[in-house]
Amino acid sequence: MISNITGDKAKELLLAAEKMPGLVFDIAESATKSTTQATDPDNTDPGPSTCIESADWCTCSHCREMPTDEEKLCCNMAPEFCISLRPELEQFCLEPGVLVIANNIRNDIFVRDADDNLNKQYRHAAYRQFIYWRFGRLGEGNRRVIPGCVVWRIREHYPSPFGQCWF
């Protein structure tokens, strides 16, 4: 694929990658999947959250059951456009470097020590990053519910050591 790209097209791709660095990883992953699927026809990677049956209240087919009715919120997008699959989610909310910086800033502001459980820190920072990305600063008393598909994507990425996440 790379050998067939002209100079102008390569510049275009590099400019896009400069604006959205996560694209480079998406392209590499896509190329790897194409190669794997071409050599292994039985390889059927379902992608995130599709190996578990989605909840009956979900329209994107990536949500799973949630403990309360308030948390049973879906992004209401078509399965292929689910917000949990967007590259921006990976870039802004799941990237460890971003989460470390966000967590350090929060700890500095609130004069807190970092929690010993790194996955817990990342999980909580990812939830905060998602809210900030989608809604901006909410302020005191203004809260939003994160769609179930996003909650489960974050939990898959940064699991609890005991398999339980309470927040």
Image: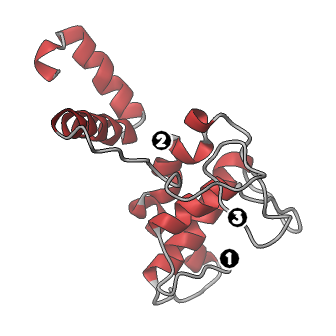
Three-letter code, disc 1 = Phe
The residue to which callout 2 is attached is: 87
Dot 3: element:
loop
Tell me if 147 is positioned left or right of 44 in this view: right
The residue to which callout 3 is attached is: 65
The residue to which callout 1 is attached is: 167
Q: Are marks 3 and 1 in contact (CB under 8 Å)?
A: no
Is label 3 or label 1 in front? 3
How far, Cα to Cα, is label 3 from label 2?
Answer: 24 Å
Label 1 CA crowd tier, 10 Å (few <14, some 14–19, many 20+): few
- At 65% from the left edge and 81% from the top edge, which residue is drawn? 110
How far, Cα to Cα, is label 2 from label 1?
Answer: 24 Å
Three-letter code, disc 3 = Glu
Residue 74 in sight here? yes
Q: Quadrant of residue 144?
A: bottom right
Q: x and y percent of residue 103 in the render? A: 53, 72
Dot 1: element:
loop
Q: Is residue 156 above or below residue 1?
A: below
Going from N to C along the chain, the mark reached first, 3 or 2, is: 3
Label 2 CA crowd tier, 10 Å (few <14, some 14–19, many 20+): some
- At 49% from the left edge and 74% from the top edge, which residue is drawn? 159
Residue 105 in sight here? no
